Image (tube, coloured by chain):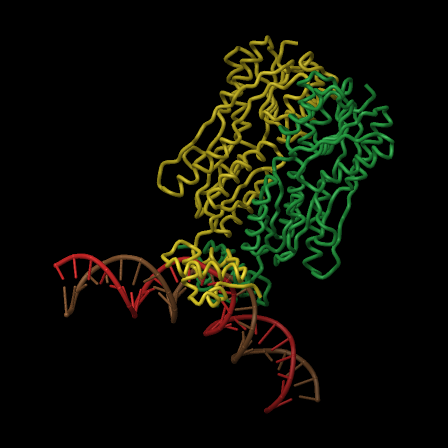
Chain colours: A green, B yellow, C brown, D red
Amino acid sequence: MSVGIRDVARAAGVSTATVSRALGRGPVSDALREQVEAAVRATGYRPNLSARRLRSQTTRTIGLIVADIRNPFFTAVSRAVEDAAYQAGLRVILCNTDEDAEREAMYLRLMEEERVTGVIFAPTRATAQAMKTGGDFPVVLIDRSGPPGAHDSVVLDNIAASAALVDHLVAQGYGRIGGLFGSTSSTAQERRAGYEAAMARHGLAPVAQACLPNAAAAEEAAARWLAEVGRPEALIVSNGLMLMGAVRAARRLALPIPGALALAGFDNEPWTELLDPGLTVIEQPVAEIGAQAMSLLFDRLKNPDQPVRKVVLSGRPVLRGSTRRG
Amino acid sequence: MSVGIRDVARAAGVSTATVSRALGRGPVSDALREQVEAAVRATGYRPNLSARRLRSQTTRTIGLIVADIRNPFFTAVSRAVEDAAYQAGLRVILCNTDEDAEREAMYLRLMEEERVTGVIFAPTRATAQAMKTGGDFPVVLIDRSGPPGAHDSVVLDNIAASAALVDHLVAQGYGRIGGLFGSTSSTAQERRAGYEAAMARHGLAPVAQACLPNAAAAEEAAARWLAEVGRPEALIVSNGLMLMGAVRAARRLALPIPGALALAGFDNEPWTELLDPGLTVIEQPVAEIGAQAMSLLFDRLKNPDQPVRKVVLSGRPVLRGSTRRG
DNA sequence: AGAACCGCTGAAAACGTTTTCAGTAGGCCC
DNA sequence: GGGCCTACTGAAAACGTTTTCAGCGGTTCT
């Protein structure tokens, strides 16, 4: 059998309480502490975290629930969250929902059963609206937000970001600017709203479409759209995966960028720079988003009753060749 | 306080043992099972997984330790592992080592403390060699392997894959073919060995360099190399991140691909197709790698004493413009 | 009819820690 | 010298489950 704290105690000639204190931060004389440490080394003792968590009623674990870790945006945010968490001595349970409300519910239930300290969550629109604040743990929303005042959140200033893209395209002389947005997140909706508002401000008619926020769906949608007669001369796309889909569609239809189609989107992924011409995008502060989320979570844990906070970060427009006047 | 199994038992008018059995797979009469289920719904009971794990001495949790989740190869493999794991009712703890032996050791210790059921691990060369088979859980190595017979593993046929790239380049008429490989993994080493063997077979002189397996390091190394007078006319690069670094370096030095430099690498990431010309790569069966790793782990758990297995998967050469005769 | 068994149930004993509670020993103050 | 701290220690309780063990009523076998 595995070696337990009793074995260490016996080996060190002390009680289990003393071993526990020596390993934790209890008051123990230096002499005994050293004996215990020696006994730990000798026995190869590893504390049982399940037992520890059960007794101490604190799991030091957070849940991180995102749509799909294969989306580089979430990957980058996750990495930032994990680094901050592990640095603070917290474990992370990572879950992929695939934008599916049922899986979201399942994972939220799992988080309750794990008695997690807190959860960082990028919910679909449906779940963000419906999520009861009931759980025993605080929830911080990332990338997407729900009804005002319900949960702490850290999001991009999507309205402004979309507007910046529209403004840029208009400045480059484009008029028939289309928008292709995701259908599942509040973020996509905000980006669409920002696009529509900016278009209206310029006296232009917005033409928006929505599809599932992945490359394949976006490619299909864009290909269909770009084959129409009154097709847009510029396209704004609401995330990195969809942007890739749009590029593929343009290739498929042999539409040179920006010659026949100007293209702009979100997420400054490395490949967007490597393409010729480079893709104009809004860069999201991914590391900052993750770090801020952890920070909000810590604050909430420290002070459960403080007012709900919403951190809004600005995207950075990265202007490249794909939006030059063709 | 939180509602426990005793509360459910009281609400249902049964003992805690019966509740436990009703929720698990014990023998319980239909009538009582329904009473219990009603009580669970009424009380909003959520079993405490820490307590359950402590008592049942089975965590239903696996560890997944990779170098960096931001590497799309690991992202894809992780996703496959997680899907298989969650489908089997197992949780996954994900850890990033950044190719650092110290963090590897730390996470392995963590896995012991979590009493995980098993671990899937992509170790650095140093750790793969030194890892004692001591842990109480089986370990399956992915992408990288250690000393023969020590651990189950699933890897690519790196020798053959590298050889395929060399053969292709030679067939295209290239002779001065350089190789840029990662410095930390057995995989990079194998790819280098395959490259050198194939070069020798063709009567060509291999010229290999090594650097940290990330984009920035590869860009620096490639840029320095490609600025030399006797620079290679073709380059084989050992993973997707480094391939991106190489592309950047070529751009920086204004070396057209494949005009002044042919380029081939590993990992068929979406962007490698989007570049003009597309990049020739070896596609790795990422989903299969993850699924096979879980499968090996399950088999090992079911039958701890079976002989060590090594699953070797073949890469698929994807020939694109970057290796056309310039 | 009694024995043996089956299907179900509850009381109580684990699981491996941390934490409470009650000491003990020594030092300090009066 | 007694009282009262301070600093440390051990016995035992607690955490919330699952699992063992024994018991029960009823059925089937001999």
Viewer-nearest residue: B67 or A175: A175
- Residue B15 sits above or below residue A89 on the image: below
Query: Picture coordinates of residue B136 (x, y %)?
Result: 43, 48
Viewer-nearest residue: A53 or B34: B34
How many numbered badges does the structure rendering display?
A: 0
* Camera sees residue B96: no
Left or right, A191 with respect to A109, comes to right
Residue under the image location 47 percent in, 46 percent down? B89
Left or right, A245 with respect to B28, comes to right
Query: Picture coordinates of residue B205 (x, y %)?
Result: 57, 14
Viewer-nearest residue: A20 or A141: A141
Residue under the image location 41 percent in, 63 percent down? B17
Query: Picture coordinates of residue B139 (x, y %)?
Result: 46, 41
Q: Quadrant of the C terminus of chain A?
A: top right
Left or right, A207 with respect to B38, comes to right
- Residue B238 sits above or below residue A81 on the image: above
Q: Quadrant of the N terminus of chain A?
A: bottom left
* Camera sees residue A171: yes
Viewer-nearest residue: A320 or B192: A320
Left or right, A325 with respect to B295, comes to right
Query: Picture coordinates of residue B73 (x, y %)?
Result: 58, 31
